[in-house]
Amino acid sequence: MGDDTYELLDYLFGPGKQDEHTDPHLVTAFDPHLPCPVRQPAATSLQDLADLLDAPAEALRGVRPVKHVWHVSVRNHADDRVLSDVEWGEVAAAMVDAAGIAPYGDEQACRWIAVRHAPDHIHSAATLARVDGRQPRLRGDIVAMHAAARAFEARWNLTPMSPGDRTARRAPATGEMAKADRRGLAETAWESLQRTVRQASSRAAGDTDFLERLRDGGLRVRERRDDEGVLVGYAVALPGDRAEGGSRPIWFSGSTLAYNLSLPRVRERFDIPVGADDWARAEVRIREAAGLLGRAGQAEGAGDVAALGDLLVAAAVHAPGLVRARLQAAAEAFEQAGRAPGERALTGRRRVESLRPRVGARTAHGPGRRRRGGPDAAARAGGGRGSGPAVA
């Protein structure tokens, strides 16, 4: 949401932050015959277009919404074919329909446009005031647009994105990344908090142990308890991460960091019903996998196999004494069977030590490369990097 229609249009039809916009033009709009301010500058200007979009909002009785500018981008995968303007126009109309901005056939709906300034995506913008003076119903707009995108993926055989189940890992916001850059941090506060909380939850044996591990990890912890003193929630903050003006810490609840880091989900990790029979079955499966690897005699996927071998060795170290020796032997057999040609064996102790995370370290697989810039840098909601059409 935004508060300046002209500023958004100036960006969408302009050259971009680093001249990355190519051939910016109008794809479609609430009026399909609306002239493009770039291709038909004599017919209309950016200010004319902004005034036209803002007219219903300006005509509202009473106070106009502060954030009255709605904006979303839709992108397809880099490996997909390039969609035509006609196809992107169809996508844009479906998105504003799904979002409740402009339902099909509703002549009193909000005014909107769709702009294309790159081959792989479009931007849709609208003002949140219907022509009839009513407010649009936008609840669940992102989820509804994801569902509309699924239909286009199936219809045009495009690369499917991850389902919009609200459990995907969110990407850091542009403001969060800028703040981390100003402070000279390798990752955002949100990323640091999520990583530390996830590590603590994976090792904790109970509520008290979990909270102590969070504090030992250097986090500020705020507990939420009911009238009887029972812990019902928690929030964490990174030391030094404060709101504008430095007046207060910026707190994140567990569920804000990740769906499975809420207190009820964390507690599910405390009592995992794993018995001796389960460990015995694990030993059998590991030995079967080692046999398959030994018979294959191939080095393909050696990195993945080695990583799994590390995990098995670590699991064996923490197994009950009754089955520990047998599980360690099975893990060593798996490691030997999966060893790439010429690779020297590592002792179990060295492998376990190598699994210890380093605070502040950035792994090879995350967090992802930062994306800077204007609205194009917005994270895609509910989707990964390989997704299309992806709604942001």
Image: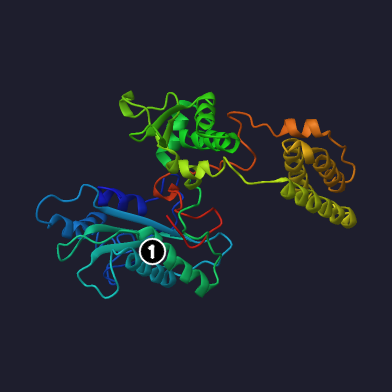
Q: Position of residue 117 (x, y in %)?
A: 42, 58
Relative side of 160 to 139, left or right? right
- Please report the residue visible at 21 percent of the width from the left and 72 percent of the height from the top: 107
The image quarter in which residue 234 lies: top left
315 to 5, vertically: above or below = above
The residue nearer to you, when weighing 103 against 348, is 348
Residue tagged 1? 144
Asked which colour scheme the image uses, the reply is rainbow
Quadrant of the image occupied by residue 244: top left
Position in image of residue 265 (x %, y %) = 50, 45
Q: Quadrant of the C terminus?
A: bottom left
SS category of the residue bearing label 1: helix
Q: What's the amino acid at mark 1?
A: Ala
- Left or right of 370? Residue 2 is left
Residue at 73% across / 30% down in the picture? 353
Q: Which residue is nearer to you in this view: 34 or 146?
A: 146
Q: Return the x and y of residue 364 as percentages of the image width and height.
A: 65, 40
Horizontally, residue 127 falls left or right of residue 263, namely: left
Question: Image height check: is 42 above or below 210?
Answer: below
How many dots with numbers? 1
At 50% from the left edge and 75% from the top edge, which residue is drawn?
155
